Image (tube, grey):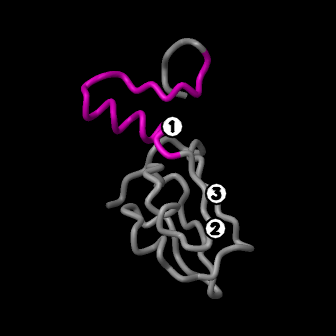
Amino acid sequence: MNHQYLKNVSTLKLKSDQCTGCGRCLEVCPHNVFYIEDKKTVIYDKNRCMECGACVKNCPFHALEVKQGVGCAYAIIMGWLTGTEPSCDCSDNSGGCC
């Protein structure tokens, strides 16, 4: 998959001091957000992250963090699936998405 979502809104964070480069995040990420460099995980393209939480759930070293299901990417996907306007609750009270 090669999807991109709204730029600079993903909540994905990598704690590189806790990463051992095991590669589990690469195995489970459906959008190729990560790669390994110098035996550590690196975020390749944060804007590809759909905030599904698979990387966080599978990281045995707690090196990743994401607010699963609260971001704009999630809101857009749910809007597509339900046929409604996306609402990620991160904007002002206008009800829109970002």
Q: Which residues are magenta?
A: 68-92
Task: Classify 8 as above or below 63.
Answer: above
For the residue labelled by badge 2, is the local secondary structure a helix, a strand or a loop?
loop
Q: Quadrant where the N terminus lies? A: bottom left
Residue behind mark 2: 63
Q: Any mark on residue 80, and which?
A: none
Question: Extreme top residue here?
Answer: 94
The residue sitting at 60% across, 72% down in the picture is 42
Q: CA distance from mark 1 to mark 2?
A: 20 Å
Q: Dot 3, how many residues are within 10 Å of its Cα: few (below 14), some (14-19), or many (20+)?
A: some
The residue sitting at 48% across, 62% down in the picture is 57
Amino acid found under the numbered disc labelled 1: Val
Q: Dot 2, how many residues are within 10 Å of its Cα: few (below 14), some (14-19), or many (20+)?
A: some
In which image quadrant can residue 87 be found? top left
Q: Earlier in the sequence, mark 1 or mark 2?
A: 2
Amino acid found under the numbered disc labelled 3: Lys
Residue behind mark 3: 13
Q: Position of residue 47 (x, y in %)?
A: 52, 52
Task: Classify 97 as above or below 55.
Answer: above
Q: Quadrant where the C terminus lies? A: top right
Tally of numbered discs: 3
Give left or right: position of 11 versus 18.
left
Residue behind mark 1: 70
Q: CA distance from mark 1 to mark 3?
A: 14 Å
The residue sitting at 54% across, 83% down in the picture is 22
For the residue labelled by badge 1, is the local secondary structure a helix, a strand or a loop?
loop
Q: Earlier in the sequence, mark 1 or mark 3?
A: 3
For the residue labelled by badge 3, is the local secondary structure a helix, a strand or a loop?
strand
- Residue 86 in the magenta stretch? The answer is yes
